[in-house]
Image (cartoon, helix red, strand yellow):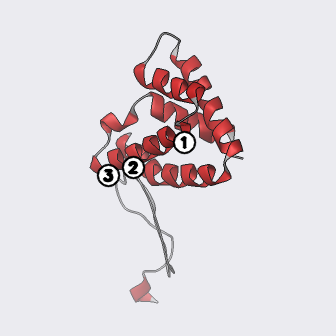
Amino acid sequence: MADQELLTTIAVTLATKTAEGLAAGGRAAFEALARLVRRRFAGHASAQASLAETEAGADSTKDDRIAVLREALAQAVADDPAFEVELRDRWRALSPHLNASEGGVINSVAGTVEGNVVQARDVHGGISFGGPDRTER
């Protein structure tokens, strides 16, 4: 079962219409997540209502709307493990875009690394690892 923190984060992301501030790739990932949730909620009136209220900014407070949406997501995940897998996949596709849109940085290292690796956002000045340069060995 998905953890409550993940479901809350997804609910907040859907509720705050985060896609508005994203670049094209992020918007596409957001829309894929939203479509998945809408499709899963089809035929479930209370879940559809919670999503509609959240998207519309209806009468209740934002926190209340997010809590109701989180619970609808939790129920959908409990009822359908395949939905949870898809939800996590869509979330993984969207997450890097959210970090980048907030002025963050995305660091990724893949494959075999021989030597030093620095992952940073802003570096002012030099970086030293305290050893001789590879050409000096």
**Toward the viewer: 134 or 22?**
22
Residue type at mark 3: give it.
Answer: Gly
What's the residue at 39%, 49% (across, down)?
A: 29
**Toward the viewer: 108 or 23?**
23
Residue on which disc 2 sits = 29
Q: Position of residue 120 (x, y in %)?
A: 43, 56
Direction from residue 131 to residue 27 in the image, left or right = left
Task: Say whether residue 132 is visible.
Answer: yes
Residue on which disc 3 sits = 25
Residue type at mark 1: give it.
Answer: Arg
Task: Give the foreground label among 1 and 2.
Answer: 1
How would you rate the neighbour count of disc 3 (Cα within 10 Å): few for under 14, some for 14-19, many for 20 or more? few
Residue on which disc 1 sits = 40
What's the residue at 70%, 43% (across, down)?
A: 79
Q: Position of residue 135 (x, y in %)?
A: 39, 88
Helix or strand or loop: what does disc 2 sit on?
helix
Q: Position of residue 118 (x, y in %)?
A: 45, 64
Task: Give the foreground label among 3 and 1.
Answer: 1
Earlier-in-chain disc, 1 versus 2? 2
Residue type at mark 2: give it.
Answer: Ala
**Toward the viewer: 108 or 59?**
59
Helix or strand or loop: what does disc 1 sit on?
helix
Direction from residue 35 to residue 88 in the image, left or right = right
- Pointers 2 and 3 in contact (CB under 8 A)? yes
| In the image, residue 10 above or below residue 129 | above
Query: Whole-Å distance between the Cαs marked 3 and 1?
Result: 23 Å
Earlier-in-chain disc, 3 versus 1? 3
Direction from residue 17 to residue 68 in the image, left or right = right
How would you rate the neighbour count of disc 2 (Cα within 10 Å): few for under 14, some for 14-19, many for 20 or more? many
- Pointers 1 and 2 in contact (CB under 8 A)? no
